[in-house]
Amino acid sequence: MSVSLLYTVNQDGTAVLTHWLMGQRNGTLGNIYSNSVMAGASNTSHFYVDQPFLATLLDVAHPPHDHLCLWQPFRPHSRLDHDGIPVPLSNADFNRILTVIGHSLASGTCETYGSGLLVFHIFCDAWGVLEEQRGFIAGCAGLYSGKMLENYFHGVRAWHLLHGLKWFTDSGQVTSALQGATRLAPSASKCPKHNPFTASLLIAIHSVLDLSAPLNAAVYACLVTSFFSLARLGEVTLRSLKAFNPSIHVKVSDIRYDEDRHGFHITVFHLPQTKTSSAGEDLHFAAQSGDINPQCALENNLTVNMPPPSAALFSWRHQGGLCPLTWSEFLHCLNTVSACLGIEPLKGHGIRVGGTLEYLLHGMPFEMVKSMGCWSGDSFVLYLQQHAVVLAPYLQDTPVLVPFTHYAMPPVH
């Protein structure tokens, strides 16, 4: 049966793939690809397609983070054990197992995987195959960045494992296919390098903000504390006004002040849950001199907005009451400031990049910066490859940092 579905598609490129796949199936590829790339460049695209859906309960009205659990496979989970004997478990038992396994993934991961699962089912329907994972990477190559396609592939794998489906893949073929897809990725799928924030830029931003205004006070406090604590912007701001969850998001009550035996003071934010740790992590920063002092900015925000201990840390007073600072509101405010300064629009990830470079340029050991930014792997080393100025002291005829190079440099691979 063919149904007409309305897709509301953001920048993840789902619109691009659907147009392309349907063009492939109908033999009308032509200019569809170039047109769909333009459609995918907008914030949101709407379009209808007619196609049969083979997966049951495949409702695109579900938010992406619910796709893994709520979208049931065409072939349901087997109720037999490995010997073919019926398993004495009820539907409620199976649903409980599904829920528990589903909680093994972070919310952001579920959302990315869920978007990939939609792309996967569109692929299966366009080619008329039953939830067939083989060929998925090749079918999407040339439409996505290699990293996004890799995330989508792992999302499909997670869905198969979650629902007890067989997973037919050859690790060697998958690796080669993903490498090939990375090389075939269109230039439009590659994000431009994020220009790092700098101390001088923070000073310029401070000069045009009225910090007695509630929103400006919250935005500037979030900006400078994130810069000096190497925070991920998504962990100190919210996706929407209704997304605040005190068990996940940082609150006013999560602030504490520590002092070492030498009398050095630091401020600590405890994040109840993060991208890499369900047990939470601590962010640290110390007072700085001048207008970019994160401690003063934080205290100003608490004075201007007066959030209670249970409120989101960077809350601000709106006409309708106290609001948590959202990611979109934060960036909108920064873009307004960038327009006033006559500079290019600012990107959120540039804050973390800039803070990292600031500490490295002050001679902080690499491993200490890595620990401070809560990097679980070596992805942070990419900042060094993109900003060679960090390595400048090590490259001189008489290296400046010779006395402590042996413990400051990261491991060599």
Image: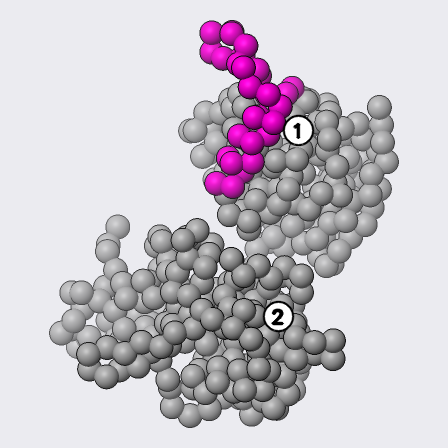
Membership of 95 in magenta stretch: yes
Image side of residue 257 versus residue 106, left or right: left
Magenta segment's dominant SS is loop
Report helix, strand or loop for mark 2: strand
Tell me the tag on residue 72: 1
Residue 173 picture location, percent across and down: 46, 28
The residue lying toward the viewer, choosing from 251 and 124, is: 251
Report helix, strand or loop for mark 1: loop
From the image, which quarter does the N terminus lie in? Answer: top right
**Disc 1 to disc 2, how far (Cα)?**
35 Å
Q: Mark 1 or mark 2: which is in front?
A: 2
Q: Please state the extent of the stretch shown in magenta in the rendering.
A: 75-104
Residue located 56% across and 70% down the image: 311
Please state which amino acid type lies under the numbered disc 1. Gln
Residue 404 picture location, percent across and down: 16, 71
Tell me the tag on residue 324: 2
The residue lying toward the viewer, choosing from 111 and 402, is: 111
| Residue 151 visible to the viewer | yes
Please state which amino acid type lies under the numbered disc 2. Pro
Residue located 57% across and 15% down the image: 79
Residue located 73% across and 31% down the image: 57
